[in-house]
Image (tube, helix red, strand yellow):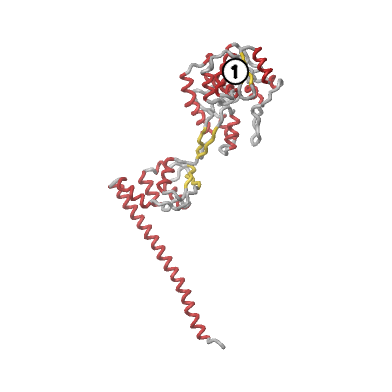
Amino acid sequence: MGKDPAEKDRRSRPRAQDSGSSDNARRRSSRILQGARNAVAGLLALLLVVLAIGLAVGGRSVLDPAIDLIDHPAGTSDETTLFVVQPGATADEIAESLKSRGLIANPLLFRFLIRYYDVAERLSAGEYELSPGMTSTEILSRLNRGLVRTTTVTLIEGWRLEEIAQALEKRGIFPAADFRKAAAESYSYAFLPTTAGKSRLEGYLFPDTYIVRAGMQPADFVREMLENFDRRVSPITQRLQLPNGLALHEVVTLASIVEREAALPEERPIIAAVFLNRLRQGMRLDADPTLQYAIAPAPVDGQPTIFWKKNLTNSDKQVASPYNTYRVAGLPPGPICNPGLASIKAVLEPASVDYLYFMARGDGSHAFARTLDEHLDNAARYQ
């Protein structure tokens, strides 16, 4: 049976009216929501004005509870993101950038807090790890205290300068070539020698665990290592008498040899005494580490380098080098590595022994001897 077109029209009209009503409802809802947002923003602005007046009249004791009530995180996530404050950035620029990254909810509140805590001139440039779950006060505290992103690196006793450079590159801190270039620059510290061997800084880049700040340059890191040497070593060398009439540079040079020779802490003062006894008698040191330093190849960036050759040959011992203590009497021109505090102390406070020789046993320890015959017996037993 056919349908009446008029009836169809009548049935369709309500549906058309329902669609229009839905659109109108959404628009009204949007206007109401926007109005609510504007009202909240207005109230917040008014509250900040009141807070500013309160700051002038009542001081922080009045305002701290009010700030706690309105200082909410922008989000709930504690996952950190990298935020960079560029050098010279103003407080307004930092606030807007934080807002655009979703790290603060209200730049107006953030700017008020900057004024409230009077830190506009103390916001530090750098890289920061921030999260939306932090309040504006927590974020501002980090920027104010300069809590920039850092990396920790441990530099081992007995490494030479090139090994330090490679370790820094491996950790992604500095390219090795950049660190070597920085180490070749001039630095003014009273303990540094005016002349030295291969590198003026070899021996003085104090081994320790360091915190590397974001944006730190290789030269800044070199200075930090040198200042650490000054803090840790200089007071000891000023307190203790230098042995055999040695200068500080000679003490550090001998300590660097002890560092490479000694595997057991308790043997450091004994090994230091052996070398000091040999120097006193005008004997060559015959120290393998000095020869290893002399024959080590120049590093090639991106390729592994063997800095300390294990099996030295008779041919190696004939190499003409001021570092070859199998041919040259006395100490080499400078340190062969960067010794730790224990090895420096061992040279300053050597064991009271009359040994002139030592032979590695193969387990990290050494057999010590007073005479060449005793030493040859040890060599036959342990080699």
* 306 horizontally vs 71: left or right: right
Q: What residue is shown with label 1?
A: 331
Instruction: Indicate the secondary structure of the residue bearing disc 1.
Output: loop
The residue sitting at 50% across, 48% down in the picture is: 81
Q: Residue furthest front?
A: 381
* 321 horizontally vs 222: left or right: right
Residue 309: image x %, image y %? 66, 26
Residue 237: image x %, image y %? 49, 20
**Quarter of the figure with the C terminus:** top right
Residue 47: image x %, image y %? 33, 54
Q: Is residue 192 above or below residue 374?
A: below
The residue sitting at 49% across, 49% down in the picture is: 79
* 314 horizontally vs 237: left or right: right
Residue 66: image x %, image y %? 33, 50
Query: Of residues 32 and 154, which is closer to you in this image?
Result: 154
Query: Of residues 369 and 381, which is closer to you in this image?
Result: 381
Q: Is residue 255 above or below residue 24?
A: above
Query: Of residues 343 and 188, which is closer to you in this image?
Result: 343
The residue sitting at 42% across, 49% down in the picture is: 135
Mark 1: give few (<14), some (14-19) or many (20+) Cα within 10 Å. many
Q: Amino acid at mark 1?
A: Leu
Q: Quadrant of residue 199?
A: top right
Q: Residue furthest bottom?
A: 1
**Quarter of the figure with the N terminus:** bottom right
